[in-house]
Amino acid sequence: MGQISDRRKHQPRGKKAILCLKCEKNVETAMSKTVGLPLGIAAKLILTNKINLTGVHLPITKEIYEPILAELAKKKSN
């Protein structure tokens, strides 16, 4: 009879990201910058047919995140 290894003993593999953001004004929060702004850009891109996906998708799809990052870069340079 063969041995069965217990995979739960091994540490999970994955990536970890940490984001630290300080806001310049009392009105702008870290949540509005990291969630609200990209979500608003995504809504605009969907309404202007620059994102043509239908259904529910994770924002890790290139068709979603690349145009959003491009818009964020434009806003940062202004």
Image (cartoon, helix red, strand yellow):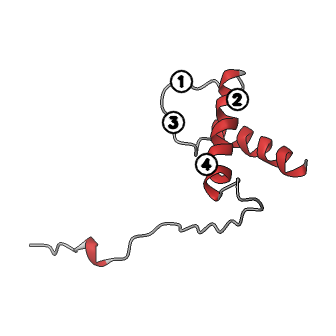
Tell me the amino acid under the disc marked 2: Leu
Residue at which label 4 appears: 35
Residue at 64 percent across and 50 percent down: it is: 32
Task: Please state which of residues 74 and 6 is positioned toward the viewer in this rendering.
Answer: 74
Give whichever of discs 2 and 1 has the lower sequence position. Answer: 2
Tell me the amino acid under the disc marked 3: His
- What x and y, as percent, mark residue 47? 67, 22
Question: Alpha-carbon distance for marks 2 and 1?
Answer: 13 Å
Task: Please state which of residues 6 and 74 is positioned toward the viewer in this rendering.
Answer: 74
Give the mark toward the camera: 2 or 1: 2
Residue at 74 percent across and 38 percent down: it is: 67
Q: Residues within 10 Å of mark 3 (few under 14, many from 20)?
A: few
Tell me the amino acid under the disc marked 1: Thr
- What x and y, as percent, mark residue 10? 33, 77
Q: Which mark is residue 13?
A: none
Residue at which label 3 appears: 57
